């Protein structure tokens, strides 16, 4: 087929140079919160977050320059399992585990409600610059499955 009639993709995805995961574009506000000024100077103005928990790269740019998770100002989820899943309100994996063990959704539901409020500062505080809702829901469902549908072990 003649390429003149083939539509090009609307966006160009950037992929982590170490693990190949599709990056999530982040703003300068996100980078400023998690990185030193010196590390920010080493990245292009447009950078991406590597969402793979197994990959050591936190941020990368289109020139394959990277900033490792160990170089960040503090641990971030999902790179560090003990970091809060919700960077704005501090919901941790242990909080979700406790909800599941008790057969309730108290902590999880409260964090999700806060994440939808105007008090959430996800663009700055979350490592990927996005609300934690997807990560929290995924972790909650995985935890429930590990502990059985009723939640109690």
Image: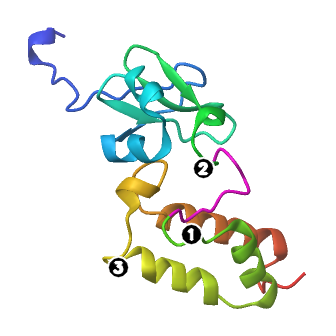
Colour scheme shown: rainbow
Asked if residue 23 can be seen in this view, the reply is no
Q: Are marks 1 and 2 in contact (CB under 8 Å)?
A: no
Asked if residue 28 can be seen in this view, the reply is yes
Q: Secondary structure at mark 2?
A: loop
71 sits left or right of 150 in the view: left
| Residue at position x 82%, y 77% in the image | 148
3D distance between C-alphas at marks 1 and 3: 17 Å
Q: In the current view of this chain or complex, which residue is farthest to the top? A: 2
Mark 2 Cα within 10 Å, few/some/many (few <14, many 20+)? many
Task: Please identify the quarter of the rendering in which residue 138 is found.
Answer: bottom right
| Residue at position x 19%, y 23% in the image | 8
Q: What residue is shown with label 2?
A: 76
Report the disc number at residue 137: 1
Q: Was residue 103 drawn as part of the magenta stretch in this picture? A: no
Q: Secondary structure at mark 1?
A: helix
**First to last magenta residue range:** 76-87
Of the pair 6 and 132, the residue shown nearer to us = 132
């Amino acid at each position: 087929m003649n390429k003149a009639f083939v539509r090009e993709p609307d966006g160009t995805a950037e992929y982590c140079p170490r693990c190949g995961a599709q990056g999530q574009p982040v703003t300068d506000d996100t980078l400023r919160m998690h990185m030193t000024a010196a590390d920010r100077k080493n990245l292009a103005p447009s950078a991406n977050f590597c969402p793979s928990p197994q990959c050591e790269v936190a941020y990368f740019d289109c020139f394959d320059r990277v900033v490792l998770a160990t170089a960040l100002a503090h641990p971030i989820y999902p790179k560090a399992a003990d970091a809060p899943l919700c960077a704005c309100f501090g919901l941790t994996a242990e909080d979700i585990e406790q909800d599941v063990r008790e057969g309730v959704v108290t902590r999880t539901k409260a964090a999700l409600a806060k994440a939808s409020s105007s008090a959430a500062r996800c663009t700055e505080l979350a490592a990927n610059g996005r609300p934690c809702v997807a990560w929290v829901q995924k972790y909650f469902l995985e935890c429930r499955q590990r502990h059985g549908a009723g939640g109690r072990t």
